[in-house]
Amino acid sequence: MAFGWIDEQAAARRRAGLVRTLRPRPAESPLLDLAGNDYLGLARHPEVAEGAARAARTWGGGATGSRLVTGTTDLHAELERELAAHCGFEAALVFSSGYAANLAAVTALAPHGSLVVSDAGNHASLIDGCRLARGTTQVVAHADPDAVRKALATHDGPAVVVSDTVFSVDGDAAPLAGLAEACREHGAGLVVDDAHGLGVLGDGGRGAPHAAGLAGADDVVATVTLSKSLGSQGGAVLGPARVIDHLVNAARTFIFDTGLAPAATGAALAALRLLRREPGRAARAREVAAELHARLTAAGLEAVRPDAAVVSVRAPSPEGAVRWAADCRAAGLSVGCFRPPSVPDGISRIRLTARADLSGDQIAQAVRVIGETRP
């Protein structure tokens, strides 16, 4: 029977406790949300919502075509200029998603005959970029510049090192300075995904590459998402102008995809301008993460010390993580639930998002609920 194998896989998922389901959320929810990625609390900010509405009224509901045909508006160009300036890069290119941006950066910068060195903890979008790239991929130990050096030493030709700046599972930061040094010793490029760093790390939320002194370097490319700190949707690649020009001409997820919708573009631009006006939001998100970690560990929970705004708490099993997240929801708290294959080490977790707009009472509520519902 056609697709009969799907039933076998579904049964295997049920046995392993790995079934995933969609849960539509209402516009107004009574839950305290520590599951989403709205790090700066901007997704529902009036200025951001108005930026989306104004763009939709002006440009319509959709981009109408690919960026190279009809999908580029003045708003896209404004966002690219301001995003590059804020993060300290020469140029930027906006995509319909952060996933598409990562696929573009990795595939277009890893041609046939090249080597891609990928961190074992990288996000799925970077992993998929490596799979689609025409170069050869070598996966190395997590956050280990020496492992990167050894991999690069085995290859004579173009090479690129690919890493998250902040890893989405445990919230730990990559050793960017060490990775850049290893790359420069071998003439390799460095591509970093700053999805969880933009808006949280660096002076005024300029991102992890800026904080590490790598922004604007001619051998460093960064990707970002507009759907986390900027509360919108979409993604972008930041880097030297010649790299951005190359992506315009060679990146398939740019050439053949419809451009980012005007509403999302307008929302991201409004959020970026608000962040520049209120740079303290970045530091506040980090403060909330540190306080969550301190209170959770004081309560006897195994929480990973956050380097940005992700706070990860270990669960005993995939089933335990699902039950823990469900019990938290029943008690008024929404948390993330990470299980295999989303976690590279096979250890299930619940994951909390530290938001700049959380109050002290809300932090205390979250810690209390997590402690009371632990498996």
Image (cartoon, helix red, strand yellow):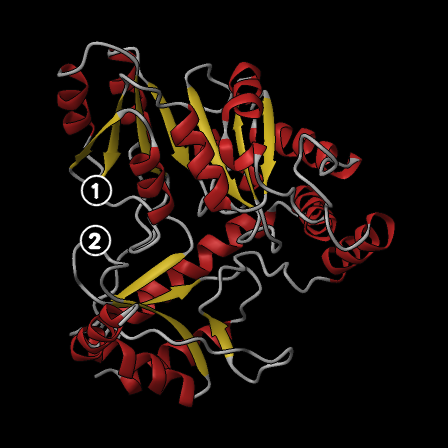
Question: Residue at left 16%, top 60%?
Answer: 346
Q: Is residue 360 left or right of residue 295?
A: right
In this rendering, is residue 51 above or below 76?
below
Query: The residue under label 1 is which amino acid type?
Result: Ala
Q: Which mark is residue 27?
A: none
Residue 201 appearing in the image: yes
Quarter holding residue 84: top right
Circle 2 sits on which residue? 344
Percent across and percent down for residue 45 are: 70, 62
**Quadrant the N terminus occupies:** bottom left
The local secondary structure at tag 2 comes to loop
Which residue reaches farthest front?
1
> Pointer 2 and pointer 1: residues touching (CB < 8 Å)?
yes
Quarter holding residue 197: top left
Of 95 and 352, which appears nearest the observer?
95
Q: Is residue 335 left or right of residue 19?
A: right
Question: Residue at left 66%, top 44%?
Answer: 272
Cα separation between marks 2 and 1: 7 Å
Circle 1 sits on which residue? 120
Percent across and percent down for residue 255 are: 57, 32
**Quadrant the C terminus occupies:** bottom left
Quarter holding residue 189: top left
Question: Residue at left 30%, top 48%?
Answer: 172
Percent across and percent down for residue 41 are: 59, 61
**Mark 1 residue crowding within 10 angstroms, few (<14) / some (14–19) / many (20+):** some
Which residue reaches farthest right?
58
Q: Is residue 153 left or right of residue 374?
A: left
